[in-house]
Amino acid sequence: MSSSELSDALNPYIAQARARTAYHQHAETTQDRPAVQEVTPTSYVPHRSELEYAMCEQPPPQAQRPPKPKVDGTQVVQQLFRALAATREAHETERKRRVQWEQDVEAKHAQRHAELEAQISDMKQEIASLRDIVSKLLPSQERVASTPRSNASPMLAAPALCPTFDTNDPGTQYQVISETNRALSESGQIAQQSGLSSTTMRASASFPVPSSSTSAYGRKRQTPASSGDEGQESGDSDHSKPATGERPAKRANKHDKRCYTIQHAMRKHIYHTMQVEPDDDLPPSYLEGLPISDEEPVRFVWEKTLKQSQHNTHMKNRVIADLQAHRRLYPHVPDDDFAKKTLSSTFDQAYTTMRQKFKIQNDASVAAAQKAREEHKVMRSRRNGRKRFKLSNRTDTRKNLEAFAHATFDGALQMECMSSEESEDDHSQNGISAPKQKVLVVRGIPWRSTRLLRFFGVLDEDDRLDKQLKPKRNTRKDRNEGPPKVGFRMPPKGVASWMISRRWLRDMQLSHPDLLELLKDIIVDPPGFDWNRFNALGYESEDELDAVSSTLRSQRLTYPPTLYSSDPNSSQASYSLQHALVPTHHDNRLM
């Protein structure tokens, strides 16, 4: 065989038998031959070589994988937005749920507070009715004052607790003070004492000139015994008065931080919306035109006013709306003050003050000027306080003296008629502290006449004698004479002609020719008073005075001698000038 073994192995037809045609000649010959036993052909088994077995079969075809879809960026962004929207919706739902829960809790607290207020008002009514019953029982108790109090009425023997409501207590506490029978007995004693004091007042009123020995009762300031009870009754019955006629509630003490006025509530709410404490510095100025959401704290453009900045106007409306929505946070402020017009004007005042505070915290020169202004304001307030105290003492003393009850003396009791009392610490500078023992410098007013000085001297002397009979609470500061007030000062409106010095009028006409025309609109002379019959304050002309104290009296620093006698047996109409010039204590006559 010419082909090689490798070609045979690679030829698939090498192992197949080929069909051959039979020739007749051979067939004929074969028929003549003797029959031979037929051999059954065996099945052909092809030969497999080692090389054929070494060839690896072709692997079956693998299933074709489906192609991956192309990633689209817009779908990814849409899915991200959908996730963010779902998260935001969940947060918004949770926030609404919490807000609703907080509103429910606040509504419950408000309802509980309203119930407590209703209980308090009912208790006030009960207390007022009990006091009315007690006041009705007092006259009947006075009629039977000769009988023992234990047998005055069988109803009074049963003890009962009488609660009193203290309106000044911030915590609104109730306190049981005493039993009813003991309160009634004490009130009976007070009524008897008030009756005795009223008879003493009527008896002393018939004597216009009280003496030094008996004036302790006549000059005593009349304070009705029931003033405290009346004050409590008025405080307990405030709910029955209209809201427009009520007095605004006052602070119990300096530790009471509650808001009683709309001004205080507005300032506090502005700091609350800015999320800043009142003692901290104000936040920096906001940029005009920059948007701000309702969730962010309130911010202002401090360099501009409310009319100059649209942003500030928007913040103003936001604060006012928030204050009206949370008005329950300020229960002590009257409801009428929450009107929009009132809140608008109140906000303007508060914003002006805060602008000044912002300038102070950012500019040292403005801070120094503001500090000097505050110190001057404190000094002026201190001096005005001394004048008010002096005026109050003289007014109370005049009420007890019938000789000066005429209306012509009303114009003298004004703050502008009081002399100035300046302390040494008012003039202290450069941080130098004043001495511990203060001395007041009295500076008189040049336009006051001699009669007016004598009038003040009588009132001060009577007040001094009255205070000598009482225990001393504090020591009186020493007073020294000083120069008169500098500058031209006109008398206040309402003074009488006898209060103006003729010497001052004559001197001032040289520099102010129109002084008489100006005084015509100021002077008021009430009719019905005859100075010819009333010589207790001496003569009007100052030229008749002695020349010893003329210099000081021209400056209105000292009192002329008083004509007010302390002799109980003397008559007021018998005074004369030569008997009236009695030496007086100079240190007690300073104004």
Image (cartoon, grey):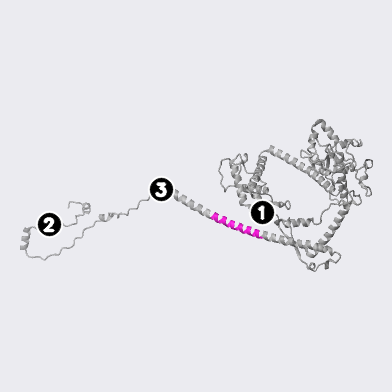
For label 1, the SS is loop
Does residue 273 show up?
yes
Vertical order, 356 against 205 (above or below): above
For label 2, the SS is loop
Q: Position of residue 526 (x, y in %)?
A: 82, 42
Q: Earlier in the sequence, mark 1 or mark 3?
A: 3
Asked if the residue under mark 1 is in contact with the one under mark 2, i.e. CB atoms within 8 Å, the reply is no
Residue type at tag 3: Asp
Q: What is the crowding at mark 2: few (fewer than 14 residues within 10 Å), some, or many (at least 20)?
A: few
Query: Seen in the image, is 24 located left or right of residue 290?
Result: left
Q: Nearer the viewer, mark 1 or mark 3?
A: 1
- What are the residue bounds of the magenta stretch? 94-115
- Closer to us: 119 or 69: 119
Alpha carbon of mark 1 to alpha carbon of mark 3: how far? 62 Å
Residue 220 disc label: none
Residue type at tag 1: Pro
Q: Is residue 131 magenta?
A: no
Q: Earlier in the sequence, mark 2 or mark 3?
A: 2
Q: Is residue 106 magenta?
A: yes
Q: Nearer the viewer, mark 2 or mark 3?
A: 3
Q: Label 3 belongs to which residue?
A: 72
Residue type at tag 2: Arg
Q: Label 1 belongs to which residue?
A: 331
Q: Residue at x 76, y 66 (%)?
A: 160
What residue occupies the far front of the structure in this picture?
528
For label 3, the SS is loop
Q: Position of residue 503 (x, y in %)?
A: 86, 34
Q: Quadrant of residue 307?
A: top right
Residue 20 disc label: 2
Q: Position of residue 56 (x, y in %)?
A: 29, 54
